[in-house]
Image: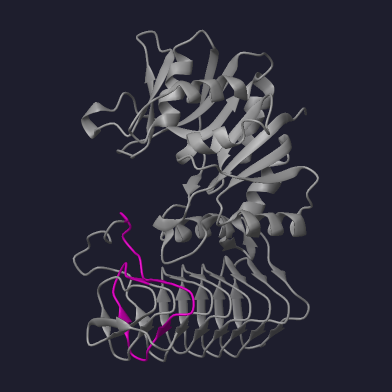
Amino acid sequence: MRKIKNGLILAGGDSTRFWPLEEKNLFSFLGRPLILYQLEELSNYCEKITVIASKKNAAPLNRLIEASLGASKYQVIIQDDLDGQSGAVLSAKNLVKGEVLIINANDIFDFKILEKIVQTAKQENKVILFGKKISEYFPGGYFKFDAKGKLMAIIEKPRKDKIPSNITKLVIDYYSDIDYLTKALEKVKTSNDDHYEVALSQLLSTEIDREYFIYDGYWQSLKFPWHVLLMTKLFLATIKASKISSSARISKKALIVGPVIIGDDVVIGDFVKISGPVFIGDNSIIGDYSLIRESQIGEDCLIGSYSEIARSSIGNKVFLHRNYVGDSVLADKAMMGAQAVTANLRFDGETVKETNLSKLGAVIGEESKIGVNATLTPGVKIGKKTWINSGEVVNQDVKDKVYFSDGKEKVNLKV
């Protein structure tokens, strides 16, 4: 199978919507950063891959790629002082030539659909796009067709009563020559957040040959912190058979049901139940009588006795002790004191604020500490290096580096 000359991965976002978590492209699933999955998958379809990074994440991305994949077919470049997707593409103007495939770094989907591009992109003067049919409003770009069904434009974030079709555009864009796109981008003048879509629409108004495919497989984008749980579920579903390290020490009294990945030197105590799919990273300890269900746990964690973790993502070096953690995300080095819990279901049956999820616990930032007997109510976000006092009931987001006590935020002088 031939390969597309260039792959362009857009990874220059500032991750501000991902708070209290950090750099979404480096967030780990099953023990590996998301960007590595994207690069390895895309390398099956592209000869050379360019990652457009921000000034903040360029250095760590470059180090990770060189250490894990080598630099022969990959390059990382910094996005110029230009905003959005159009700015990312224009930043590659003098470094990427010829045909190009553009994807978002924080989207996962079935990469096998790229075979359609390889099979159909056989001529010049061509653009290929992908869309997905939706049943409810999505704040993104929509395909607009003429009376004969010809794709004529992309309308970005229309009003709910003005959507031009039920097909939303995915960021899987192929151009037989990137110059077609960059020239269109340079001509566009708009004050709205639709520079790329306006340029693409202008390109579609010409005689350029265009084709589109409707994608009906899985799709998940990592924009907000609760998206970690949706993406974790997809990655866990890829565990089809158990892989347990020979150095893991598992009590004969423990019960493992379903597929699991258990890393090196993991210790699993008496009467533990693990209900897969589950991932447990190297050197982690699961204490006696604990229950782990459909979750990922990072390296060097201590999951203390009698804890329950359900449908959650646990980072590295996390410490738990007799806790219930349901539908939650705990970043690296987070700690929860005995009997602290994350509530994950509203009594009124309504979806959790902002998310449209029926179940969502807490999102806890790096190095934060939750005191004994504290309760985090559904959907609460706890900032980085923040301490929650013992016995608190937290029903609001709490900022970074705060000491939260008696329902009030104070500067945390200890960090």
Q: Name the residue nearer the viewer: 359 or 299.
A: 299
Relative placement, left or right, of 57 versus 403 is: right
Q: Name the residue nearer the viewer: 355 or 178.
A: 178
Q: Is residue 94 visible?
A: yes
Using the image, determine if residue 388 lies above or below residue 295: below
Secondary structure character of the magenta stretch overall: loop
Residue 34 place in picture, x, y as percent = 60, 55
In percent of the image, x 22 and y 83: which residue is there?
407
Residue 35 place in picture, x, y as percent = 62, 52
Using the image, determine if residue 214 lies above or below residue 268: above
Q: Say if the magenta span includes residue 381.
A: yes
Q: Name the residue nearer the viewer: 180 or 393.
A: 180
Residue 183 place in picture, x, y as percent = 54, 21
Residue 325 place in picture, x, y as percent = 42, 77
Using the image, determine if residue 40 lies above or below residue 209: below
Scheme of image coloration? one colour
Relative placement, left or right, of 50 versus 180 is: right
**To which quarter of the image does residue 236 belong?**
bottom right
In this rendering, the count of numbered labels is 0
Residue that protrudes farthest toward the front in the picture: 81
Relative placement, left or right, of 23 versus 380 is: right
Q: Is residue 239 visible?
A: no
**To which quarter of the image does residue 101 belong?**
top right
**To which quarter of the image does residue 128 belong?**
top right
Residue that protrudes farthest toward the left in the picture: 348
Which range of residues does the magenta coloring cover?
355-382
In percent of the image, x 54 and y 38: which residue is there?
88
In percent of the image, x 77 and y 42: which residue is there?
73
Q: Locate the C terminus by quadrant.
A: bottom left
Q: Say if the magenta span includes residue 36.
A: no
